[in-house]
Amino acid sequence: MSSRNPSYSTPKECNHLTKYKLKHGLDGYYLIQEFVKTNPFGRTMIDKSKLELPRCSFCSGYQGRLYFCLICSSVTCCLSPGSDHTLLHSQSFDGHEIAVDLERAELYCSVCCDQVYDPDFDEVVMCKHMMELPRSENGDLRLCKRKRLNFGIDLDLRNVKRLVSLRDQWSKSCFPLGLRGLNNLGNTCFMNSVLQALLHAPPLRNYYLSGRHNREMCRKRSNDRLCLPCDIDVIFSAVFSGDRTPYSPAQFLYSWWQHSENLANYEQQDAHEFFISMLDRIHEKEGKASHAIRDYGDCQCIIHRAFSGLVRSDVTCASCGFTSSTYDPCVDISLDLDTHTSYPINVGKPSKLNESAGTSTLVGCLDLFTRLEKLGSDQKLYCENCQEKQDALKQLSIKKLPLVLCLHIKRFEHFPIKRLSRKIDRHLQFPFSLDMKPYLSSSVVRKKFGNRMFAFEGDESDSNTEFEVFAVVTHSGMLESGHYVTYLRLRNQWFKCDDAWITKVDEEVVRASQCYLLYYVQKVLYHKSSEDVSCLPMSPHADRFVPIAGCC
């Protein structure tokens, strides 16, 4: 617990950083202070103009991430997990584990492979920034204006004083770092609600905050000036910069319009359609740089690594029992509301109600999703065993669970023949903690055969089945004139993101809302990322999306 901010709990220090400070104190911090600079947006970095062109002491390269050793001042690079000269340097010289990221001016532990947090280092950096601020003759901050940039950000230096004390403001605030409102650009609540959820999806957040998407390299590889992943990278940087003023994702909206011309207008769009469209566009760009292919031809881009799952479909001949199984990749699961029964809070037995009344449960929707279904006469299966078309039974199950599980609740129904659409205003109870084991293929098949224990091909018993909800996108109002809002669960507290407005709410408010998209993440990732939401939990060298140490 920090003595300067008793209400703010800092994460535990890295053991290697603790050993470094015990032996060397803050000498290295003050040595690097001379080279620290801060741009008008509050982002700190190392001023390379005061140094010779930094090159790696091992390979003389200057690409990738460069790190400055606080012991011997050597510069080392990290291009990939297989080419990590920063780690090699620390292995060659005992006690040389702590370095400074030249691009971000952040402490980095080469052994932990992650940024590490130290309030003393932050104080040194911010003191340097305060010393560089223009002052009047009496010593007060001198405020003046700069030209407005062409992308609409006002650099009025009256905001500099706020930027200087930004970290202290955040430490005293009950809002975790990364909570920032998004301005409505004209019926864009559908976009803002999904963006808020994705900005706090641990795998996606770890990927972008760790610099995995290099905008400069991306521009060199492609002549396309409109890059959706680059625009998302900009949004991540802005949202996690510490600035709490609402942000306008105008460039992102324009890029999305160019990639989805059929949706390029100021009309209200469906949040689920936008979510799928956005993932597709990112996959198209990021997938080109991903060449590793695993089972079932999975793309190894960040979207598929985070959201991709596998649904198994078993179609069984009702005559002889022959079963044909197919596997379909998915990035979300669409669930029908169980409208046949209702579970009012104060009533013990279910009662028959109309589809828009009463309450359904998420467990009931998942049971309905995996329930055995008899196919109609127009969907008869050609049985390879019977050599003719037969009546068939179909059952869905989940072969592979993703890191981030998106559950889409089908609230909107469309009838093309009648040219009618409607919304189902039925309340859905959902758990904050969800165990998906009953819906895995192995569990469903075993239940089908009386829960007999037998060897099952590709048993998923070793997979993580426990999930925690971290975001809920809700829809209120009518089908044509509704409004989307996102509720975020950070540090076990709920925050309502209503476009530009961020407010803290009780969990009862979330439970009473009309959920449309539910975002769950594997429990191990949720708890580790919740230790401090301001951390940079994704190591450039780690295969899994597990936070290791430190924060920005």
Image (cartoon, helix red, strand yellow):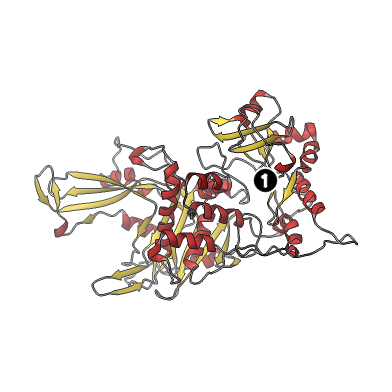
Q: Nearer the viewer, residue 378 or 114?
A: 114
Which structural element holds mark 1?
Answer: loop
Q: Is residue 517 visible?
A: no
Image coords of residue 366 (percent x, y): 36, 56
Image coords of residue 471 (percent x, y): 50, 58
Tell me which residue sits at (78%, 31%) in the image: 23
Q: Is residue 463 visible?
A: yes
Q: Which residue type carries mark 1?
A: Pro
Going by the image, does 391 lie left or right of 494?
left
Going by the image, does 60 lie left or right of 330?
right
Point out the residue furthest to the top here: 92
Q: For residue 546, which quarter of the picture? A: top right
Tell me which residue sits at (66%, 38%) in the image: 108
Note whether 93 is above or below 176 in the view shown: above
Q: For residue 161, which quarter of the picture? A: bottom right
Image coords of residue 541 (percent x, y): 55, 36
Q: Which residue is mark 1?
A: 11
